[in-house]
Every structure is written in structure tokens, then in C-alpha cells.
Image (spheres, rainbow, N blue to C red):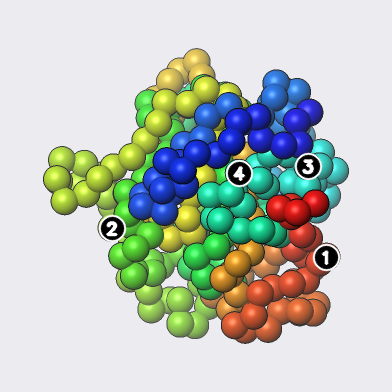
Amino acid sequence: MNRKILNPITEDEINTYHKDGAVCIRQQFDQEWLSRMLEVCENRITAPSGSARRTQKNNDPGQVITGSFMAHDNSVYMDFAKNSPAREIAARLMGLDEVRFFYDQMFIKEPGTQTPTAWHHDLPFWPFAGNHIASVWLALTPVTVENSGLVYVGGSHKWDKIYLPVPAVPIPNFVLDEASEFEDCPMFHKEFDNPDYRFLSWDMQPGDCIVHHPLAVHGAGANASLEQRRVALSTRFFGGDATWYGPRTTFTPPHTEIEEGLVRGKLPANDKAFPVVWKKYN
Ligand SMILES: O=C(O)CCC(=O)C(=O)O
């Protein structure tokens, strides 16, 4: 399995990431990574464990299976976070010499599921502040807008907005204090014909990934395909100007309850919760 990227990240890709808040990076993972990660994600369909969740709404012929923090109880995911090219992709796009692993999340949408991914950006869910937090959303199956591919609002990470974090499955008292005052994220699919917005989406093959900024607004529609399952693994990394803010929601990454090294305004340099996984000069 390749530890290093297969092709250099280009200036064009870096500029797009900074300008749009999201960029699609093609084919940087070898087949062994893809087969391995698809298998371990699909195992969660039949044997959900850890934080895997399944949502199936009334009258929805499909379902959504999600999971978070898998790396903390499954070494295959931790190996991906510590050794796959995802780390270097995130670091190079953010222009950092060193990145830490934040957490991982998987998103499976079974054929025919009606459940959309609501419009949101990620930062208000998290106890962090700063720009240098990148998510690498790796397609493990073919992805199109028709089968619930992500759609981004280009440049939305520069709007100076922070939207109310709403979990996909309702969680009682999820939002804490000040975050409950944040405004609702608009339903941007109603604006698809509005020339004021630039919507970005990509047809993807397994092994393509989208890397997005923590304030890039994104969402996805139903999986309208009746044949194609959509499986993605989102692995998040940070460094540079990222700082600990303190919880805005009940989202609590493993080992952060101890609070060692977690000081508001400082890089969350807690090696157990957020190990350093890539250094430029290694
Ligand atoms: O895959 C999805 O539907 C949601 C992904 C997402 O919101 C993320 O990775 O931040």
C-alpha cells in the first residue's frame, strides 16, 4: 500500500483548494488501500460496531450507515490515518510541514435511500477554530450527483458565516450555549439556478477524493440509483493555525475528556487524541 502520494499535488490544485474551499484530487491511493477500506467500511453494514449508526426513515426504501472515530477501535482505520497518502494530500493542500490526525467518519448510502445530507459546514460541530483543518473525503465506490455525490458552494469558506450544527440523526441537547444562536444553514438546493452561487460537484471513481476546508458549505441529495451503493471515508487532519476552542456541541473526540494540551487558542497538541501523522522532513 502506498504511503506517499502517487503524483505531486499541483499548484493548480492548491490554488483551487484555497479559492473554492474544496478540490477533487484524482487517483492517489493504490488498489490495495481501496479494497481494504471498502471491505472494512462495508463490514459495518452487517456488523455495526463502535459508533456506527443506521438511519432508515419511514417510507425510505434505502438507508444510511455512518460511523465516527473508527480508528480508535479498529487498527485498519488507524493504519489508514497514519500511513495512507491522505495525510500528505491534506498537508500539501494546506501548505503545512506537519499534520495531526483529527478523526475519521464513514458515510454509506444504500441504493434508493431518500435521505439527503443536509447543507452544513463542519467547523461549528467541532471544538476547534482556524483554517488549517482539512477533510479528505475518499470515494470507495463510483460517485455521481445522482447517487448522492457531495455538492459544495464554491468560495463559501470565505463568507465569514457560521451556521447552526444540526446532526443527521437528532441527538438530544446536541448544541451547547453560544452555538445554539448560530443561524440556520440555507437550503442551497433551492438556489441551484441562482447565478450568485457557484455549485461544485464531481463524478468520481473509487480512489478519487475531495478535500474540503472546515467552513466549506456542502450537502448531498438522495441516492437515486437503485443499484449503486455509495461508500465514502472522510479522514480529517489539522495543523498550522488550528486551535482548540472548546466544545460547541456534544461532539467529543476520544481522549479529549482528559483535556491535556487542550488550551483555548492553542494548537491541540494532545498526542493521544490527535497524533502527528505526517511531517514534511521525515
Ligand atoms: O458523505 C456525506 O454524505 C457527508 C460527508 C460530510 O459531510 C463530510 O465528510 O464532512
Callout 4 secondary element: helix
Q: Nearer the viewer, mark 2 or mark 1?
A: 1
Q: Residue at x 46, y 64 (%)?
A: 165
Q: Answer yes or no: is residue 49 visible.
A: no
Residue to which mark 3 is pinned: 83
Q: How many neighbours does mark 4 have within 10 angstroms: few (below 14), some (14-19), or many (20 or more)?
A: many
Identify residue type, mark 4: Ile
Per the rendering, the mark at residue 89 is: 4
Q: Residue at x 70, y 24 (%)?
A: 30
Q: Answer yes or no: is residue 131 visible.
A: yes
Q: Are marks 3 and 2 in contact (CB under 8 Å)?
A: no
- Mark before the other along the chain sequence, 3 or 2: 3
Q: How many neighbours does mark 3 have within 10 angstroms: few (below 14), some (14-19), or many (20 or more)?
A: some
Q: How many neighbours does mark 1 have within 10 angstroms: few (below 14), some (14-19), or many (20 or more)?
A: few
- Mark before the other along the chain sequence, 4 or 3: 3
Above or below, 37 relative to 234: above
User: Disc 4 versus disc 3: distance between alpha carbons?
Assistant: 12 Å
Per the rendering, the mark at residue 272 is: 1
Callout 3 secondary element: helix
